[in-house]
Amino acid sequence: MAISRYVLLVFTIAMLASTAISDPILTKVNRHIYLTSQIVRVLSTLKVENPGPLIMSEVLLAFPELQSKNLAYLTASSHETKGKPKGSVVSLPIKAVNLDERPSGATFYSVLLPKEVAAGESFTLDVLAVFTHALRPVPEQITQADIQLVLYRDSVYYLSPYEVKVQSLIVKLPDSKIESYTKLESTKVHGSEIKYGPYENLPPFSLSPITFHFESNLPFAVAQELVREIEISHWGNVQVTEHYKLIHGGAKSKGEFSRRDFQARPNDRGASAFSFLVAHLPARARSVYYRDLIGNISTSHLRVDSRKSELVIEPRYPMLGGWRTAFTIGYGLPLQDFLYESEENRFLNMTFGSPMIELVIDTLIVKVVLPEGSSGISAAAPFPIKQWQETKISHLDIGGRPVVVLEKTNVVPEHNQYFQVYYKFSGLSMLREPLMLISGFLFFFAACIGYMHADTSISKSSASYLAKQQWEEVQVLIQKVQNVINRCLAMHDNLEASLRDLSRTGDVQACKAARKSADGLLKELSKEMKPLLTSLQAYSSAAQILPKVEELVAKERELQEKVMLKHSTAVEGYERKSGARDIDHRVALLQQKITALKQEVDDILQFIDDI
């Protein structure tokens, strides 16, 4: 289906090739496609010439539908800055544009040049496009012993609304293990590199599909959701907590998994699995922890140097294709390294993305928790994001702490850039919590003094004491009733379990024996219940709760009847050798009633507990 749509796009583009969108000419195009990880990076160097007569101030970039839906990051810079320090490279402004006449599904972006290009002059720029989920596993399912093969589709020609004089393409693969690739004129293979071109005098919107089917056992770690919470304390700490929901996004694992084989031969038995992740934390990270829902995970290692802290974490089990895990990492940072202030104006300057290496994030949510009393709040990031504000209630808070929430989808390591949160905060507000603690202790001591001097004794002959004692006796009886009901419900569960064993083994006699045992125990429990109800009726303080208790007993008996009827119907069906579908059909209505009655019994039990 994808190939047919791609071919349709080629024909559509060919029809529009005669009407160029703009006059500039690409005199030279060099493209490098890096397929060395799950994230596809395409670096294009474009030499744009203005043939005139108008002045050129912007350049259009085009992406076919096959790529535009997976485009995560796009940046352009002047080629003259190539080789300079990373901090000195300035990205050129880019914005999405809509064109009246364009190929079906193509997406266009406009790059604003740093200076106007006059007629006859040229300008060279570097364009980096980063794509996620562009490598498709083929086959989509593999066993533990199989290698992972992925498929990538692109065009050997650079898609552009301009005429291209000369262009070439280099594709970099993880290694030289290639299943297949598109062979065209001027194609050369050097180990893990495939070179195409040069190709000359190509009209606008030229496309020629190419595919690469190759081995890639690198980690396909995808965070379906990452929630980063950054909590600022003006007492000197920035606490960062990151909650990950991770999945192996490669070919799904099928069949059984052998941990023994994986540990003995990890390169052969689970080559596409990954058993650890690496996170580059800030240099002065402290109090680092790594845990999941079960508790702390000890299989982690922290290496610290003057530039960064490297955290190596190992999940509780190796991650095969399609497997999921959830975990949390947290660490503290010195406040002075990330917060800057001038009088009452302050701003936080931190990186946006995940510290994990080569991690794709489907949805990233960053929550910046500011101190209570902050005002004039705003946030800025170097790329488009959704943002809103909410409130978090924490210890010693009165109105809650303001929280700036930033959300972005399809996040890659290139998004790990600095963002800022600006706010105003008075230093006097820091005294709020200490004053609350002092006031609380003073009130506590005053209450203790008052209590020690007050006479709070209660006479055992007083009406309030007798009412309290009677209510305690009622509570003991109600607990005994609840205990009997819970034992009855446990017997119901045992009968349900016997039916599951019957469907699995077909042992009718064992099922009947379970029924007989349950009948006897339920009769004994019914005898225990009668004196308890009689005793409750004798207490006047139980008048309000007694109807609910009686309703609970009646609902349990009705539930018991339905469970017994379901059990008898199922056993009778197996004795008649009826089919499983026929038996399920006969007990379906009963199961619905049983489910409803169980819910009613649980609701009444909860109501009694609340009282």
Image (cartoon, rainbow, N blue to C red):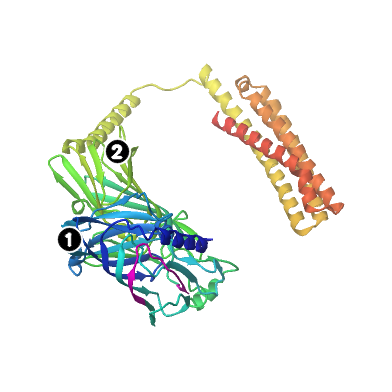
Residue 97 image position (x, y, % from top left): 32, 50
**Residue under numbered circle 2:** 402
Quadrant location of residue 360?
bottom left
**What's the magenta bit mostly, secondary-structure-wise?**
strand
Check if residue 297 falls in the magenta segment.
Answer: no
For label 1, the residue is 119
Dot 1: element: loop
Mark nearest the camera among 2 and 1 is 1
| Residue lying at 84% horizontally and 52% vertically, measured from the top left | 578
- Find the residue positioned furthest to the left: 343
Return the residue nearer the eye: 211 or 506: 211
Where the C terminus falls, by quadrant? top right
Q: Is residue 376 above or below residue 611?
A: below
* Residue in the picture at 71% in, 44% down: 491
Q: Nearer the viewer, residue 142 or 531?
A: 142
| Span highlighted in magenta in the image | 196-216
SS of the residue under disc 2: strand
- From the viewer's perspective, tell me whether residue 554 is left or right of residue 540: right
Q: Position of residue 120 (x, y in %)?
A: 17, 64
At x 47% / y 62%, what residue is drawn? 6
Residue 442 point in image, percent of width and height: 26, 31
Answer whether residue 296 is visible to the viewer in this image: no
Three-letter residue code for mark 2: Pro
Q: Which mark identifies residue 389?
A: none
Residue situated in front as seen by the camera: 411 or 579: 411
